[in-house]
Image (spheres, helix red, strand yellow):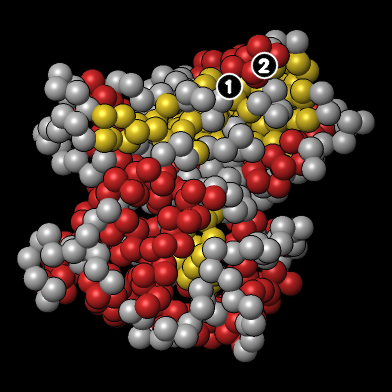
Amino acid sequence: MNSLARFGRRRGRLRNGVRAVAVCAIAGVVAACQSFTDLGLETGIRPSDSPIIAQNVRSGRLARVGEAQHPKILATYGGEYANPKLERMVAGIVGKLVTVSDNPSQVYQITILDSPNVNAFALPGGYLYITRGLLALASDSAELAAVIAHEMAHVTANHGVLRQQKEAEVELASRVVSDVLSDKDAGRRALVRGRLRLAQFSRNQELQADAIGIAAIGEAGFDPYAAADFQETMSAYTELRNAAGYGNSGLDFLATHPSTPQRIDLAVSHARKFGPRGSGTREREAYLAGIDGMLYGDSAEEGYVRDQVYSHVGLGISFKFPDDFDIDNRAEAVLGARASDSAAIRFDGVDVPTRQSLGDYIASGWVEGLDTASIRPITVNGLNGATARATADQWDFDITVLRAGKAVYRILTAMPNGATSLDSLAAEVRNSFRLLSDAERSALRPLKLTLVTARKQDTVGSLARRMKGVSRKKQTFEVLNDLRPGQAVEAGRQYKIITDSI
């Protein structure tokens, strides 16, 4: 499949008009608008032929449920992240947990997902999933063991069975909605939102999984306090995302595993049953060695955000967000938001027949509140395009559509009604859109997690300044390395940084 086809599949399409942009590109940047890739999308991705923990014979209704959902999970989260070193490390942790499990006969298939989102979850039948984003955030083997044990507890306690029954009811209702609506995509999106909401276990189920999981890591010899420690790290991570204007993505761990001070206190009380802190192993050095060199952040398929510039090597395109915009590179679109004036920008790709003019495409019915008299042909850095204005609810929109080769891209800029700076803002973003040179494409590299050893003269600030491709470097460094604000680094200790070095 070529790069544009992948881009179109991952980014999705807006066929519900500009009103959807107002909801998702503005409110969604700060309130987690759930417009994700359809979990029911048929794909050619198949389950792993060599899972980390393989079950030679898997049968029964629960196994069939997990097996049916597995390819859809892969499609949603970018497929598997193949890394033998990581797989061996995770397998070792799972092996220790299985030996102390209440159900040691349960066999698990662990999949590391190629996603920067911080998430872990389980499906009926022993299917467990961990994103590389979560692996980057955890500080040691004990913290990862706490996450895995929590998800294993959901499996052994059959929490997924109860959720599956509710899911069937929502799917039936959503199909009725889809059949009634003329917009089939809207019905499918409703179905996805229903499934994501049901991905949340009840509070009692989460607390039960906490208790079972903490007991498991304690019995396996890990530090049982790691569960509470990682919950605190997740809270700091959420605060960092909220400060950047991202909110909680529905594909992130805390969206389905909300942490509270009370929950952390309960986790500590469960850990005390095994004794004081330090009563178990953390295996920090071994864990860091396992994640050293791991891909961090966006993959090449989704494009890279570097210093306000979005670039896609495969598509050969680039454009720049204004300096005061927070950027969220999501699966369905690249979104930007500015808190000071509620401005928002959405960028995505769309299929437009080469024989159709871009002006006719804008007028084809996908834009709500379109002022057809405002449609104008334009040229941007040698690329043909068209612009228009629209108004929907409390928002004014600039619609820009550009053709680059056989591909067509949309830049939708929104501001509250009557904002006088909409034209200048839209022009700034539009005029930055261009094709990448061969040299620029060659120079773009993915970010990786790298270990550095602190020297005597090093500080949090000096190590954070070595980071590449991330905003709020100091805060990101602290969250990645489980440091509280004001806490100093220790000479001779290893820390995680993000770099684009090969």
Label 2 is placed on what type of residue?
A: Leu
Residue drawn at x 15%, y 33% as measured from the top left: 490
First of labels 2, 1 by sequence position: 2
Quarter occupied by residue 189: bottom right
Pointer 2 and pointer 1: residues touching (CB < 8 Å)? yes
Is the residue marked by circle 1 packed among few (<14), some (14-19), or many (20+) residues within 10 Å? some
Residue drawn at x 62%, y 89% as measured from the top left: 60
Q: Is residue 87 visible?
A: yes
Q: Which residue is mark 1?
A: 444
Instruction: Tell which of 205 and 396 is nearer to you.
Output: 205
Q: Looking at this rendering, what residue extends furthest in the right direction?
A: 355
Is the residue marked by circle 2 packed among few (<14), some (14-19), or many (20+) residues within 10 Å? some
Secondary element under disc 1, as helix, strand or loop, is: loop
Instruction: Tell which of 74 and 194 is nearer to you.
Output: 74
Secondary element under disc 2, as helix, strand or loop, is: loop
Q: Which residue is mark 2?
A: 436
Quarter occupied by residue 200: bottom left
Residue 230, image x, y percentages: 26, 56
Instruction: Tell which of 69 and 87 is nearer to you.
Output: 87
Label 1 is placed on what type of residue?
A: Leu
Residue drawn at x 33%, y 48% as measured from the top left: 286
If the image is split into quadrants, where does the N terminus sit?
top right
Q: Looking at this rendering, what residue extends furthest in the left direction?
A: 276
Residue 276, image x, y percentages: 7, 66
Residue 342, image x, y percentages: 40, 34
Q: Relative to residue 410, is residue 103 depicted above or below? A: below
Instruction: Tell which of 105 and 300 is nearer to you.
Output: 105
